[in-house]
Image (cartoon, helix red, strand yellow):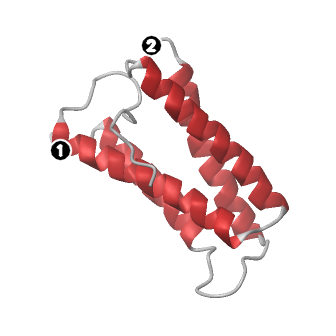
Amino acid sequence: MDSAPNGRQIEISIMEMAASKLRAQLPEDGEVAWSRNFDEALKFNQKIWDVFSADWMSPDNQLPRDLRQNLLSISVFVKKKTFSVMALPDRQGLKLLIQLNENIIDGLKAGLNADPAPSNGNQLGAEVPLT
C-alpha cells in the first residue's frame, strides 16, 4: 500500500491523459478537423474539468478561497473554449486547451515537491502559472 499514488499524483495522471488525448488530435501542420476522436478528446477533457470544478465549489474543499475562485474562472473559460472548438475546430483553440492542462500539471508537480498533499479535497492548489 505504501506505493499507492496519492491524490495529487492521480490528478496529474488524469490531466496528463486529457492533455495527451487533445495533443493526439493536433496535426503537425495544417488545421484540425472534426472527427469522432476529436470530439471524444474534447468531451473527456471537459469532464475532467467539470469534476475538478465541482470539488472547488464544495464547502469541504480546503484550498484558499481566492485560489478556488481563480481555478473556477479558468474552468469556465475551458468550458467556453471547448464548446467553441467543438463547434468550429480551431488549431489555436486546441493548443490553448492543451497549454492550460499542461500548466495545471506543472503546478501540481511543483506542489508535490513543495509540500505534503492535503488529506481532503482536490489537490489543484499548487501555484499554477498561466504563461
Foreground label between 2 and 1:
1
Residue 46, image x, y percentages: 65, 47
At numbered mark 1, what does the secondary structure look like: helix, strand or loop? helix
Seen as rendered, the residue at the extreme front is 131
At numbered mark 2, what does the secondary structure look like: helix, strand or loop? loop
Q: Nearer the viewer, residue 93 or 60?
A: 93
Report the quarter where the N terminus lies.
Answer: top left
Q: Which residue is mark 1?
A: 113
| Rendered position, 59 above or below 99 | above
Seen as rendered, the residue at the extreme top is 59
Relative placement, left or right, of 90 versus 126 is right
- What residue sits 45% from the left and 50% below the top? 130
Give the amino acid at mark 1: Asn
Q: Is residue 2 visible?
A: yes
Q: Nearer the viewer, residue 43 or 130?
A: 130
Q: Nearer the viewer, residue 14 or 113?
A: 113
- What residue sits 77% from the left and 68% below the top? 89
| Rendered position, 24 above or below 119 | below
Seen as rendered, the residue at the extreme right is 87
Report the quarter where the C terminus lies.
Answer: bottom left
Q: Nearer the viewer, residue 92 or 63?
A: 92
Instruction: Give the CA distance from mark 2 to mark 1.
Output: 24 Å
For residue 29, the mark is none
Residue 92, image x, y percentages: 65, 68
